[in-house]
Image (tube, rainbow, N blue to C red):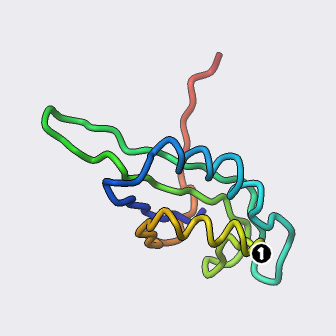
Amino acid sequence: MIIYHIKLPKNQDLEAFVTFMREEYFPAVDKGSTRVGQVTDLHLLERENEFEGDDVSHEFLWQIGWSGQPTGKAHVEDAAVARKLATFQADIKRLGSYRQVADWQVVK
């Protein structure tokens, strides 16, 4: 999987950003197979305040399920969607490519 850290400026509307990512950006991501891999799933995680006085609002992790080479990335060909993402003035930094090495789940 590929992980990005996203930080929005404080003046940006969080709900508008989340709605855009869920309803416009994620559907526009190319999910077809490429030479280096394929997007298998997309997740946007909003950071929560852990301690009193924390102000970590406007921070997200974007997790991209990826089958392929660790150099891959999600791609959007729709220029209008890419421009709209830019209007949020988000600082988007790739943290790296990770592979799952352990898992645990509650059995129901």
Q: Name the residue at the top extreme.
A: 108
Judge from the rendering whether residue 63 lies leftward or rightward of residue 23; answer left or right: left
Give how far across and how far down residue 89 sits, in percent.
44, 68
Give how far across and how far down residue 66 sits, in percent.
69, 64
How crowded is the residue under tag 1: few (<14 C-alpha within 10 Å), some, or many (20+)? few
Above or below residue 25? Residue 37 is below
Quadrant housing residue 9: bottom left
Judge from the rendering whether residue 25 lies leftward or rightward of residue 5; answer left or right: right
Judge from the rendering whether residue 105 lies leftward or rightward of residue 56; answer left or right: right
In which quadrant will I find the C terminus?
Answer: top right
Judge from the rendering whether residue 37 lies leftward or rightward of residue 20; answer left or right: right
Query: Who's the residue at 73% across and 75% down the image?
Result: 79
In the structure shown, which secondary structural element does the residue marked by tag 1 occupy? loop
Q: Which residue is mark 1?
A: 77
Give how far across and how far down residue 63 sits, in percent.
56, 56
Q: Name the residue at the right extreme.
A: 32
Query: Who's the residue at 44% across and 47% down the image?
Result: 13
Query: Who's the residue at 55% across and 46% down the image?
Result: 18
In which quadrant will I find the N terminus?
Answer: bottom right
Name the residue type under label 1: Glu
